[in-house]
Amino acid sequence: MIYPIVAYGDPVLRDVAQDITKEDFENLSEFVQNLFETMHNAGGIGLAAPQIGKSLRVFVVDGNGSEDQELEGFKKVFINPTMLEEFDEPWAYEEGCLSIPNIRESVKRNSKIRIRFYDENWNELEEEFGGMQARVIQHEYDHIEGVLFTDYLSPLKKRLLKGKLNNISRGKVSADYKMRFPKPPKKKRR
Ligand code: NI
C-alpha cells in the first residue's frame, strides 16, 4: 500500500516518535513493506514512519539504484533505533527530503555513526556506518526525533526559503507522488 507523504508543516513531522512493541504491532512486516513501497514509489532512498503520518520509531533505507556506489546493496529496516554516537570529520552534502520537494541544501554531519536498533525480525543489532550510509541514517533518524534538514540552515538561508516552505505546506508544489498537506490554501481576495 502506498501512503501519501506528509508535507512540511504537518505537526507529526515535529513530534518525537514513540517506540513500538511486538505486542502492539502484530503486522510489522506489512507495515515495513508499505514504507518501502511508498518510498520506492516516490523515488526516495530513505523514509521514516512520521512521513506517512505515524509517529513511530521506524524507518527504512534502500540505496539500490541510486547511482551512488556506497549505497549499492544498502537496504535496511531500523526499528526503535538509538543513536549511540556520531563522530569523525564533519562533511557537507546537499540533502533533500520527500516531505520537502524541490529543495536541496547543504548540511554538515559527522561522517561516522554507531547505532543500536532492531531489525524487522526483532533481532537487536549494534552497527557502525560511515559516509553516505551514515548520512542517510542520520537524516532518517532526525525524522523520528522531529528534526528536519532545514533546521540546520543558517538564519539567512531559512529566511530565504520561508516562502517556498510555506507554499509546500499549502500544497503549492509539484511532486510526482501523492502528498498530504497540512494547511488550507490561502483564500483568494476578490
Ligand atoms: Ni527526509
Image (cartoon, helix red, strand yellow):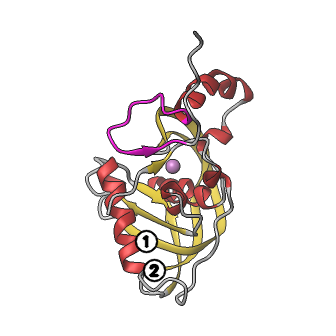
- Residue 177 counted in the magenta span: yes
Which label is found at residue 141? none
Quadrant including the C terminus: top right
Q: Position of residue 98 (x, y in %)?
A: 45, 45
Segment colored magenta: 169-181
Q: Position of residue 146 (x, y in %)?
A: 66, 55
Farthest residue to the left: give it: 65
User: Which residue position holds label 2?
Assistant: 119
The three-letter code of the residue at mark 1 reads Val
Q: CA distance from mark 1 to mark 2?
A: 6 Å
How packed is label 2: few (under 14 Cα within 10 Å), some, or many (20 or more)? some
* Picture residue at 49% right of the left edge, 33% below the top: 171
* Picture residue at 57% right of the left edge, 85% below the top: 21
Residue 71 visible, this angle: no
User: Which residue position holds label 1?
Assistant: 77
- Residue 102 counted in the magenta span: no
Q: Report whether 177 appears left or right of 169.
A: left
